[in-house]
Amino acid sequence: PPELITGSEQDHIISELINEFLSTDLPADWPKQLRRQVMELRGFRVELRDLITVCLEHRIEPEALAKLGIEHKKPEWEAAAPFFEGYLKRLREPANENRHDPSTLLTVVTEQLSTEAWPAIAADLKLIVVDDAQELTPAASELSISARNACSF
């Protein structure tokens, strides 16, 4: 079965990627607001993780994030793309084959449920109640819609 990685595991992956990056010289065209001191802060890791989460939920790949950064004059997005790519590589390593962060887990489950039969444990569902639906992320909203469409009321 799929395994959910924790927020601290996500933070650890991102921290490793940042440390690897900081062990080299910053590129000449690197955004000035992303100084080395900023990138060492916990808040930077949190913001980077939030950006990656939003990209995953909207199915935006690292290359697309870099292009969006150029199009919208957001050099931070362009600079975040390599971290995002490294994050995905770590998440998709063979040892992590069935491990997912919350965003990828929701999108994988939604895709599976739209193409495969629901598992026996959920086949008899008649009602699914979603609390605080206005706060659902895009991925959770898609899963909710898939579940609604699969249930026979």
Image (cartoon, rainbow, N blue to C red):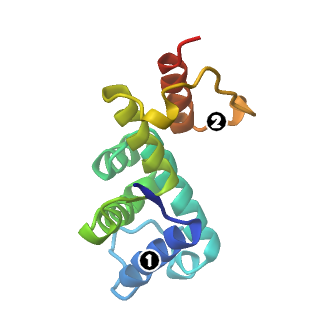
Residue 152: give x, y in percent of width and height.
53, 13
Tell me which residue sits at (51%, 32%) in the image: 122
> Residue 6, located in which quarter of the rendered image?
bottom right
From the viewer's perspective, is residue 108 above or below residue 21? above
Q: Nearer the viewer, residue 63 or 126?
A: 126
Mark 2 Cα within 10 Å, few/some/many (few <14, many 20+)? some
Left or right, 148 with reference to 105: right
Mark 1 Cα within 10 Å, few/some/many (few <14, many 20+)? some
> The residue tagged with tag 1: helix, strand or loop?
helix
Amino acid at circle 2: Leu
Amino acid at circle 1: Ile
Res. 73 in view: no
> Residue 115, located in which quarter of the rendered image?
top left
Residue denoted by label 2? 136
From mark 1 to mark 2, how far is it between C-alphas?
29 Å
Residue 58: give x, y in percent of width and height.
44, 38
Q: Nearer the viewer, residue 77 or 151?
A: 151
Of label 1 and label 2, which has the lower sequence position?
1
From the viewer's perspective, is the residue at label 1 or at label 2 nearer? 2
Q: Nearer the viewer, residue 19 or 118?
A: 118
Residue at the far right in the pictured view: 132
Which quarter of the image is occupied by the N terminus? bottom left
Tell me which residue sits at (54%, 67%) in the image: 33
Of the numbered discs in the image, which one, if any, rests on residue 117?
none
Tell me which residue sits at (51%, 46%) in the image: 54
Residue 40: give x, y in percent of width and height.
55, 81
> The residue tagged with tag 2: helix, strand or loop?
loop
Tell me which residue sits at (53%, 76%) in the image: 39
Residue at the far top in the pictured view: 153
Residue denoted by label 1? 18
Res. 145 in view: yes
